[in-house]
Image (spheres, rainbow, N blue to C red):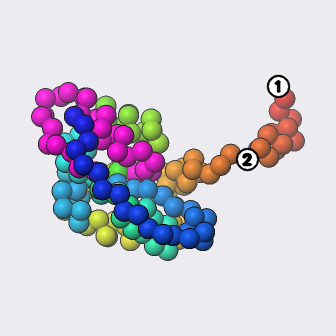
């Protein structure tokens, strides 16, 4: 099942915007206002970027409604659409999809039907300001460029090849 449509929102954020720690999160939503879809059957994802201070819609990826036949090929386009996201909020997600999402560094998060997307974004921004939960801290750490100095610290601890 291929991606049907993709809308990307372009903005002219300056140099200050580029230096802020941003994450991408997706919401399985038919109306872009509330989470109301199962991951594997989602007809659309609203993808936002956010940091502790602000958030904004980055893109919307839409798909043809899949046949509920257990065919996992339908996941490929959905997984590709979430490239760069740290999490996807949905009503439910199957075991195989969970494994594939986690393998790509995307945390699946199940929420109750009708949970508000703006509410979830506010909660995430609050969490970023107050100190991220374990999954979000891991996601932020994975996005940081690796420093060559980490090898110096290992050598100082007595590590050698």
Which mark sits nearer the N-terminus, 1 or 2? 2
Q: Closer to the camera: disc 1 or disc 2? A: 2
Q: Where is 75 relative to 21, above or below? A: above
Task: Residue under label 2, please give it.
Answer: 147
Q: Give coordinates of residue 124: x percent, y percent.
A: 42, 65
Whether pointer 1 and pointer 2 mark residues with C-beta atoms closer than 8 Å, the reply is no
x and y, in percent, of residue 8 in the image: 35, 57
Query: Range of the magenta residues?
Result: 61-87
Q: Quadrant of the C terminus?
A: top right
Distance between mark 1 and mark 2 Cα atoms: 19 Å
Q: Quadrant of the N terminus?
A: top left
Dot 2 falls on a residue whose secondary structure is loop
| Residue with the mark numbered 1 | 161
At horizontal 35% and vertical 51% (from top left) the residue drawn is: 88
- How many neighbours does mark 1 have within 10 angstroms: few (below 14), some (14-19), or many (20 or more)? few
- The residue positioned 49% from the left and 74% from the top of the image is 53
**Observer-nearest of 59 and 140:** 59
Nearest to the observer: residue 156 or residue 67: 67
Q: Is residue 87 above or below residue 21?
A: above
Please identify the quarter of the rendering in which residue 122 is found: bottom left
Residue at 16% across / 43% down in the picture? 64
Give the total number of marks visible in the rendering.
2
Circle 1 — which element? Answer: loop
Q: Position of residue 116 (x, y in %)?
A: 25, 67
14 relative to 43, above or below = below
Indicate yes or no whether the magenta region holds residue 88. no
Q: Residue furthest top?
A: 161
**Label 2 crowd (10 A; few <14 / some 14-19 / many >=20):** few
| Residue furthest bottom as drawn | 53
């Amino acid at each position: 099942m291929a991606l049907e449509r993709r809308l990307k929102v372009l903005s002219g954020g300056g140099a200050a915007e580029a230096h802020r720690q941003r994450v991408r999160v997706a919401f399985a939503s038919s109306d872009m206002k509330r989470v109301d879809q199962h991951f594997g059957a989602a007809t659309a994802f609203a993808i936002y970027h956010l940091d502790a201070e602000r958030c904004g819609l980055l893109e919307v990826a839409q798909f043809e409604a899949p046949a509920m036949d257990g065919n996992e090929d339908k996941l490929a386009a959905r997984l590709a659409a979430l490239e760069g996201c740290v999490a996807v909020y949905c009503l439910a997600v199957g075991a195989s999809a969970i494994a594939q999402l986690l393998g790509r560094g995307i945390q699946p998060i199940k929420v109750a039907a009708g949970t508000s997307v703006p509410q979830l974004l506010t909660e995430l921004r609050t969490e970023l300001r107050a100190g991220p939960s374990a999954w979000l801290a891991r996601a932020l750490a994975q996005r940081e460029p690796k420093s060559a100095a980490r090898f110096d610290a290992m050598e100082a601890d007595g590590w050698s090849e």
